[in-house]
Amino acid sequence: MALRKPPLRDVHADWDATFTEFGGWDMPVEFDSIRREHTAVRERAGIFDVSHMGEIEVSGPDATALMQRLTSNDVTALSPGDSQYAAITTDEGIIVDDTIVYRLPSTGDETYLFVPNAGHDEETVEWWTRHRDEWGFDATVRNTTEDWAMFAVQGPNSPGLVDEATATPLELARFAIEEVSIAGTTCLLARTGYTGEDGFEVLCPWDEAEGVWDAFVDDDECPPCGLGARDTLRMEMGFLLSGQDFHPDDEPRNPFEAGIGFAVDLDTEFVGRDALERVQREGVDERFVGIELLDRGIARHGYDLTTEAGDHLGHVTSGTMSPTLSKAIALGYLPVDYAEPGTRVDVVVRGSGKAARVVEPPFIDR
């Protein structure tokens, strides 16, 4: 099957980007170097093309009821222009995906846009429409993934860049979304992101993407950044990656194991709620933790985690060399008895146990 392409694929190629397949999309993994792009976001700002993320619109008289039943947080708490982080779970409470749910501003009715992870848009629409029909709800569910381009402008200088691009000083709160004009294009601007830095995500019409991109990108002040830097940035913060830190088949985890219990509201009725109430009451056997290597070596996805004596404990779900800390870090699940910060464990790298210790993410202070 041919890879899906973001609207600015050719523009990225002109910047000499290197590309990778991710979630069925042909996406830029780096433009200059992962370290340079990572550092730009931590110290100044950078812009990511994240048009591979899904966008699903839900509207109609029962839109709120449908969203409430299929996401783990309290959708009724959202006013127009608000958003929240939530999980999508099975009846057994296993995470299928995580998402940001936006209640769109200025629509005159209850309309939601939520963002599943790359390659999940079609299956998510099917999940929503199947339950809508089963429950007899009056709601329209539309896959708008290829209607929208999506860019993430991230870093401590991002507020000034956004003010300049919109020609208006903005007072947009964290997790708020509003309609703005950028380069003559009507966009949705949200104060959200995946880097741990202050930042914004911009949704603009697919066919008008280049003008909006050009309003921000600058090789010195806001360089283009690829998925490589996005990955190292999110790992330093301990943020989950769908399909790697959780997967309904390969890495089945519930929100309490995965450290996102804060996005579960058990006072609401949603698919998986009863199972998660039991988990909260009984506790978990394993917890998502950060791991810092003490010996030389880099922990990679799938590497075993053991005791110092070599007894198997678990495995690494994500790992990298932290550009900020210049040390190897990893994420994974450990039995609760080994999950306390400071606990000594080993990471098995090429058959050899490397000394490491458990830390509480994030790895850096933000």
Image: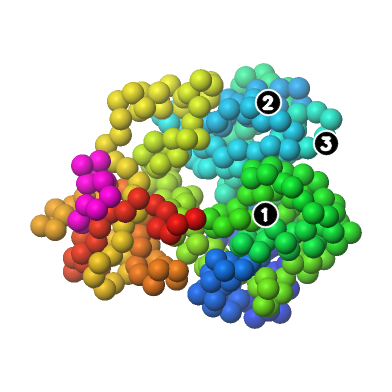
**Residue assigned mark 3:** 106
Residue situated in front as seen by the camera: 90 or 44: 44
Q: Is residue 38 magenta?
A: no
Magenta stretch encompasses residue 342 = yes
Which range of residues does the magenta coloring cover?
335-345
Residue 315, located in which quarter of the rendered image? bottom left
Q: Alpha carbon of mark 1 to alpha carbon of mark 2: how far?
A: 25 Å
Q: How many marks?
A: 3
From the viewer's perspective, is 107 left or right of 171? right
Residue 29 visible in the shown view: no
Residue at the (82%, 66%) spot, across then down: 211
Q: Position of residue 93 (x, y in %)?
A: 43, 31
- Dot placed on the residue nearer the N-terminal end, 3 or 2: 2
**Dot 3 amino acid type:** Ser
Residue 200 shows which numbered tag?
1
Q: Is residue 192 left or right of residue 293?
A: right
Residue type, mark 1 in image: Phe
Q: Which mark identifies residue 64?
A: 2
Quick one: label 2, few (<14), some, or many (20+) residues within 10 Å?
many
Q: Position of residue 352 (x, y in %)?
A: 18, 69
Viewer-nearest of discs 1 and 2: 1
